[in-house]
Image (cartoon, rainbow, N blue to C red):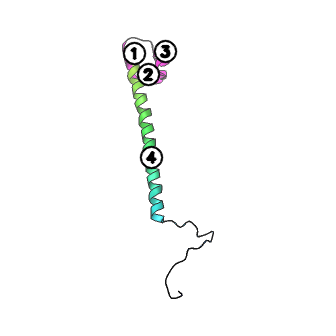
């Protein structure tokens, strides 16, 4: 068997757990992509909620509600509401 080009697996602590570097890189990239998509979705939801608050504030102002009440109902600051007017 000495002339045979066979490979033996070693139980050496430094070599256990062989892995394919390209496969690991792909797994990491997929994980980062999924994380980025989730983050983007969260940002989109937050942005949508803010736009909804602004829309509600505009309608409340249009109906004649005073700014302090609009702040109370929407959670927007007076400065944010002043920019809507």
Please name the residue shown 42% across and 12% down the image.
Answer: 65
- The image shows residue 42 at horizontal and vertical percentages of 45, 37
Please name the residue shown 56% across and 74% down the image.
Answer: 9
Measure the C-alpha gap from mark 4 to mark 1: 37 Å
- The image shows residue 80 at horizontal and vertical percentages of 45, 24
Q: Which residue is mark 1?
A: 61
| Mark closer to the observer (4, 2) | 4
- 51 shown above or below 30: above
Measure the C-alpha gap from mark 1 to mark 3: 10 Å
Q: Which residue is mark 4?
A: 36
**Helix, strand or loop status at disc 2:** helix
Discs 1, 2 touching: Cβ within 8 Å: yes
Q: Which residue is mark 3?
A: 68
| Mark closer to the observer (3, 4) | 4
**Helix, strand or loop status at disc 1:** helix
Q: Which residue is mark 2?
A: 81
The quadrant of the rendering that contains the C terminus is top left
**Taken as a whole, is the magenta stretch helix, strand or loop?**
helix
Q: Nearer the viewer, residue 64 or 23?
A: 23
Q: Is residue 66 visible?
A: yes
**Helix, strand or loop status at disc 3:** helix
| Mark closer to the observer (4, 1) | 4
Indicate yes or no whether the magenta region holds residue 78. yes
Q: Earlier in the sequence, mark 3 or mark 4?
A: 4
- 12 shown above or below 68: below
């Amino acid at each position: 068997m000495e002339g045979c080009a066979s490979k033996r697996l070693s139980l050496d602590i430094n070599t256990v757990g062989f892995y394919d570097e390209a496969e690991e890189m792909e797994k990491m990239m997929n994980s980062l992509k999924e994380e980025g998509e989730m983050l983007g979705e969260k940002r989109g939801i937050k942005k949508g909620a803010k736009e909804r608050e602004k829309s509600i504030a505009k309608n409340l102002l249009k109906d004649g509600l005073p700014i302090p009440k609009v702040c109370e109902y929407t959670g927007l600051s007076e400065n944010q509401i002043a920019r809507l007017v």
